[in-house]
């Protein structure tokens, strides 16, 4: 919930290959009042129907302004479609068996359509949940197509470290496997706010964590959470890993200093990611997301992943800060062209599904002819440089 990630992508499909050309991206901070209201609405706090309506509207308006700005500044005023993943407020997981019963993303797409005049594909997770899936991690759609050739004879994992960390395990000739590994930045950010009485939103550059040491007694209790031992497909969110979760865990050990708490949570994120990668024989990890900005976390990941190599997605042409935004563009493109998202092996859905709902823009809705070719590959291509 740091802000709104927006990206402009040029996409085309031919002969079973989708080409994605990144055309630019940006991160637009939420207004402080709206961000604080979103944080206050997260479990275990209560959120009234009135507050939910206000947040859905205000997030939709914030998305609309950001999309309109990107349309003007990054797309030259020309685009065919907007796709919106929404802002997750709740991911409803049955504690008994880990089955996902529902998921809620807010940010009413009508505001985006009104501001841009373009059709909007939104509500992308719900159809997968309705088909028996987890609705996450949808990053598997991109990683499965993008990383398969990179895998060669080995096994590659696409790792995204947002509030929650997730991996997609890709081999050359097997269905992709994807799932949430546990907290990415969620507990780190919650701890930063907790030890600063709300003054800090995060431990900038992991500086405070670097000053501390891992408390093995606390780490042992954290790693005993049954989520880590559950078999995939599985997903989680901030409705599980939040400030109260931390407080309840800290009550079980002697006093922990702020730097030691953050150092321990860095170790938790790195350990759970590394253990998941080792379980699948991963030899290379392609990482993206906000966690990449935390040098202390990256050092821990490299140490625990060895001998597997850690590669930034930027090195392969896809900006790590904007990967989720480009993923959203891809998901919208697939739905627009009638191409089902093939993620059953990752999310547990009963089969491939066309994801999302379409809100018309200012003109009558005219979809292209559905693509009938099976899509097997995604190629990320650098944009042409003027004059070359």
Image: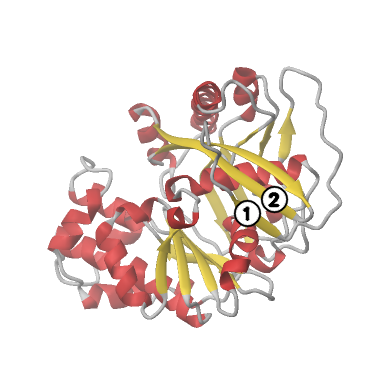
Q: Is the residue marked by circle 1 packed among few (<14), some (14-19), or many (20+) residues within 10 Å? A: some
Q: Residue at x 33, y 57 (%)?
A: 187
Q: State whether residue 270 is above or below residue 114.
A: below
- Most extreme residue toward the front is 388
Q: Is residue 196 visible?
A: yes
Q: Position of residue 346 (x, y in %)?
A: 64, 66
**Residue at mark 1:** 379
Circles 2, 1 touching at the beta carbon (< 8 Å): yes
**Residue at mark 2:** 18
Q: Is residue 288 visible?
A: no
Q: Position of residue 41 (x, y in %)?
A: 43, 40
Q: Is the residue marked by circle 2 packed among few (<14), some (14-19), or many (20+) residues within 10 Å? A: many
Instruction: Return the disc, 2 or 1, that comes first in the chain's sequence.
Output: 2
Q: Residue at x 53, y 21 (%)?
A: 72
Q: Position of residue 269 (x, y in %)?
A: 36, 66
Q: Nearer the viewer, residue 12 or 72?
A: 12
Q: Quadrant of the N terminus?
A: top left
Left or right of 25 on screen, residue 358: right
């Amino acid at each position: 919930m740091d802000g709104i990630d927006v990206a402009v992508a040029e996409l085309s499909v031919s002969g079973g290959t989708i080409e994605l050309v990144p055309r630019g991206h940006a991160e637009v901070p939420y207004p402080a009042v709206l961000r604080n209201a979103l944080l206050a609405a997260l479990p275990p706090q209560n959120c009234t129907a009135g507050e939910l309506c206000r947040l859905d509207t205000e997030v939709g308006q914030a998305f609309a302004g950001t999309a309109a700005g990107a349309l003007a500044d990054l797309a030259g005023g020309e685009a065919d479609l907007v796709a919106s993943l929404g802002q997750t407020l709740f991911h409803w997981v049955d504690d008994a068996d880990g089955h996902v019963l529902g998921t809620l993303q807010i940010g009413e797409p009508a505001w985006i359509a009104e501001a841009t005049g373009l059709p909007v594909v939104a509500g992308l997770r719900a159809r997968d949940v309705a088909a028996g899936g987890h609705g996450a991690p949808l990053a598997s759609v991109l990683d499965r197509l993008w990383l398969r050739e990179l895998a060669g004879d080995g096994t590659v994992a696409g790792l995204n470290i947002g509030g929650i960390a997730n991996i997609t395990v890709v081999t050359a000739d097997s269905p992709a496997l994807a799932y949430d590994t546990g907290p990415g930045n969620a507990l780190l950010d919650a701890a930063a706010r907790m030890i600063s009485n709300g003054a800090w939103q995060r431990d900038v550059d992991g500086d405070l964590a670097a000053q501390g040491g891992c408390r093995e007694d606390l780490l042992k209790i954290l790693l005993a959470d049954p989520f880590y031992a559950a078999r995939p497909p599985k997903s989680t969110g901030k409705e599980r890993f939040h400030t109260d979760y931390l407080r309840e865990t800290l009550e079980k050990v002697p006093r922990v200093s702020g730097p030691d708490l953050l150092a321990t949570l860095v170790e938790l994120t790195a350990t759970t990611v590394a253990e998941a990668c080792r379980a699948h024989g991963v030899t290379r990890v392609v990482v993206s997301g906000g966690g990449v900005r935390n040098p202390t976390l990256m050092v821990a990941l490299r140490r625990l992943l060895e001998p597997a190599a850690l590669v930034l997605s930027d090195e392969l042409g896809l900006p790590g800060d904007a990967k989720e935004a480009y993923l959203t563009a891809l998901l919208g493109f697939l739905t627009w062209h009638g191409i089902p998202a093939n993620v059953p092996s990752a999310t547990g859905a009963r089969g491939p599904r066309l994801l999302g709902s379409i809100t018309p823009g200012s003109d009558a809705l005219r979809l292209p002819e559905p693509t009938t070719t099976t899509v097997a590959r995604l190629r990320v291509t650098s944009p042409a440089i003027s004059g070359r």
